[in-house]
Amino acid sequence: MRLQDKVAIVTGAAGGLGATYAHAIAREGGHVVVVDVANGEGTEAAIRAQGHRALALQADLTDEDEVKRLMEAVMAEYGRIDILVNNAGGAGQRPAESEIEKIDREHWDEIIAINLTSTMLSIKYVAPHMKRQQSGKIVNISSRAARGTAWFGQVTPEYICAKIGVIGLTRQLAKELGPDGINVNCLVPSFTVSGPALQAAWEKMTDEERTTMIEATPLRRLPDPEELASVVVFLVSDESSYVTGACLDVNGGSLMA
């Protein structure tokens, strides 16, 4: 097993892609800490039912005090943190506008916070522990939207800007934390139908939007969640020991189209 006894925090793991990443890490032998603002006990139970190890902890990752307490709780439980997968994020629950004149400031702040600020805070409070170990693997999750413009109307400027920020943060922190033996990389996935929120987003698209997305992808399909999880496992394993500051695009070739 590639991650035997590694302690891994996966944020936004109560469901969707976060849960897929958590399962994939657990199958490779990792102790997975399932973190979400919602109750992650379902993911914990599902991992344990497969004979693997997991612990669910609840935290609002936009709240600095809660992030600090989270990292302290993991250290108290395991004594080390080897892996951090910053998956928490999303487009928010309220209706949003893509036109600049109609952008709501409160919604803008919310989306920046849940996608970018949460990533920064999680790294801020995990970094001291990884520095003491002189080792660690951090994977931030961005989006194909950060590589260009929106494919469909539900992708808003605030979401795109937040995910671009995740890429920039990844590169800067790879440089800063590299001397301490910490690898910082980024997964840049295409749209993936995984979990209720993304299923709803797919269903809200027009037939034209779905067709455009598929036809703009040389592989002519959306990714399977496990195809993204396998890249995350690679980035947190020893197989990627000399990879840092990388932003790996997993999009079926759509950026070439």
Image (cartoon, rainbow, N blue to C red):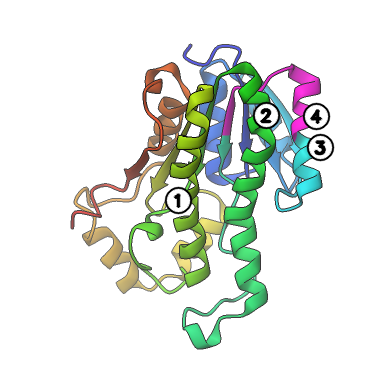
Position of 101 relative to 90 (above/below): below
Name the residue tied to disc 2.
128
In x, y percent, where is residue 243? 37, 28
Among the two numbered marks 1 and 4 on one chain, the one whose residue lies closer to the N terminus: 4
Among the two numbered marks 1 and 2 on one chain, the one whose residue lies closer to the N terminus: 2
The kind of residue tagged 3 is Arg
- Give the CA separation, mark 4 to mark 2: 14 Å
- The furthest residue to the bottom: 101
- Give the CA separation, mark 3 to mark 1: 26 Å
* Element type at mark 3: helix
In x, y percent, where is residue 241? 41, 20
Question: Residue at point 57% right, 27% down?
Answer: 83
Name the residue tied to disc 1.
168
Q: Residues within 10 Å of mark 2 (few under 14, many from 20)?
A: few
Name the residue tied to disc 4.
73
Q: Is residue 201 left or right of residue 19?
A: left
Q: Please identify, in this view, whether the residue under mark 2 or under mark 3 is nearer the observer.
A: 2
Q: Please identify, in this view, whether the residue under mark 3 or under mark 1 is nearer the observer.
A: 1
Q: Can residue 240 be found in the magenta stretch?
A: no
The answer to whether the residues at label 4 and label 3 have Cβ atoms under 8 Å apart is: yes
In x, y percent, where is residue 44? 69, 30
Task: Please name whichever residue, 47 or 172, is drawn nearer the observer in this view of the structure.
Answer: 172
In x, y percent, where is residue 134? 57, 18
The answer to whether the residues at label 4 and label 2 have Cβ atoms under 8 Å apart is: no
The answer to whether the residues at label 1 and label 4 have Cβ atoms under 8 Å apart is: no
Among the two numbered marks 3 and 1 on one chain, the one whose residue lies closer to the N terminus: 3
Q: Which residues are magenta?
A: 71-84
Q: Is residue 114 left or right of residue 166?
A: right
* Element type at mark 4: helix
Question: Residue at point 19% right, 54% down?
Answer: 256
Q: Is residue 58 left or right of residue 235?
A: right
